[in-house]
Amino acid sequence: MTIGRRHLLGASAAGLAMPTVARAQARVINLAGASFDMREPILREFARRTSITPRPWVNPSTQARVDRVRTAPVDCITTDAPFAAYGRGENLTQPIDISRIPNWAKMHPLLKDGRATPTSPLGLGANPGRMMYTSDAKTQAIFMPTFFQMDSIGYNTRHVQAENNELSWGELFNPKYRGKVALFGIDWLGMLDAALGMKALGLINPADISNLTNSEVDTVVAFLKEKKREGHFRALWRAYGELVNLMASEEVWIADAWWPVIVEVAGRGIPVRYAVAKEGYRAWCQGQAISATTRNLDACYEWLNFWLEGFAGARQTEIGYFASVDTYGQYLPPETIRQVYGGEGRDGGSLEDRSQRVFVWNTRPSNLEYYTEKWNEFLAA
């Protein structure tokens, strides 16, 4: 399956041409979204079906999207699990009534129940199945997952050897790759990947790797400073295109990468693969939350239900994500379903296999300010 960067980066809302029927209607929905989901095919189809005109405000920062409710009209927000909890805690969002979401029951059990099967690991951190419901009754949720993925290690097979395509997170710190390593450059996420690598090497054993104590943060940062002094890192990457260029030029041999990055680099003829994470994947999901200040609640539920109907999930599948519900079949060719969900020709195997190997979820730590302070020390070292 070929995934182009143009599709991954999404479409600018400014250039979106809405159908005449949508422009003629007074109904609008104000969206705080990101480039990876505020994409022209999705927005256009929603407008065509509902005659509701979407007005997206696009920002790469989840924090900024959630906080926009404080200063501007917002109806629905693209958020991940960690910032869904933040938004609810700040009274910026309101609970979703699950009875108004008919396809909720079809949601993948990794998201809905917190684990893929009853015997699978219960992933640590901001596991949607553990933290998105407002009570044990599970009648309300703080956000609705729409698509998800599991992150691992991308590597150049010309320089990095992996048996059966399996690599430990600890390989990110293997001295053999000194000067050819990239680590994600955002504080809490870069720290999580570093802690995964250190745990694999026996250098740290936190009670909750997704929410390190201040002392554990100090340990991780001290280790990272030492690796930096050794010249271990070629780059601390922050953007999709940046890592594509680093790996395509072979300046970087191994990185905590996003799967679509590896697809694009491989498409340029570079021998890169996406490893099965020996200790387990770091998973994440994106979804929709409803603003606490919305005056368009019915339109919000139309937007949420559109996301689970299948069309939007199919479009996200085309760019390498897993849809949260399996209603996409009518909108995708069978070969795409076999590739993405069945794992045909895809590193890491099927969704069924991958979903049973989740170790931890992206998580906003409770002491984020301390993470940021110490991460900035690492950057300045």
Image: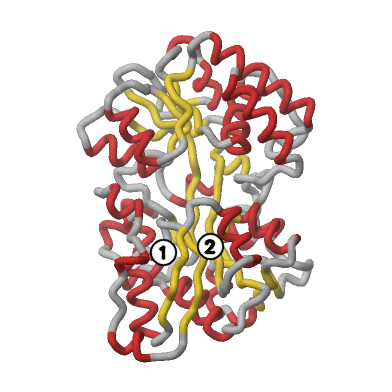
Q: Which comes sooner in the sequence, label 1 or label 2?
A: 1
Three-letter code, disc 1: Met
Which residue is painted at 33% across and 83% down in the image? 48
* Residue at the left extreme of this rendering: 269
Q: Nearer the viewer, residue 152 or 27?
A: 27
Three-letter code, disc 2: Thr
The spot of residue 234 in percent (x, y) is 43, 20
Q: Is residue 197 above or below residue 115?
A: above
Q: Nearer the viewer, residue 115 or 89?
A: 89
Q: Where, quadrant-wise, is the C terminus in this rendering?
A: top right
- For disc 1, the marked residue is 38
- State the image quarter where residue 163 is shown: top left
Which coloring applies here? secondary structure
Check disc 2 and report its element: helix, strand or loop.
strand
Q: Nearer the viewer, residue 306 or 278?
A: 306
- For disc 2, the marked residue is 78
Other-residue count near label 1 (Cα within 10 Å), few / some / many at <14 / 14–19 / ≥20: many
The spot of residue 91 in percent (x, y) is 74, 66
Which residue is painted at 62% across and 66% down in the image? 71
Q: Nearer the viewer, residue 85 or 91?
A: 91
Mark 1 vs 2: CB contact within 8 A: yes
Which residue is painted at 49% across and 28% down in the image? 183
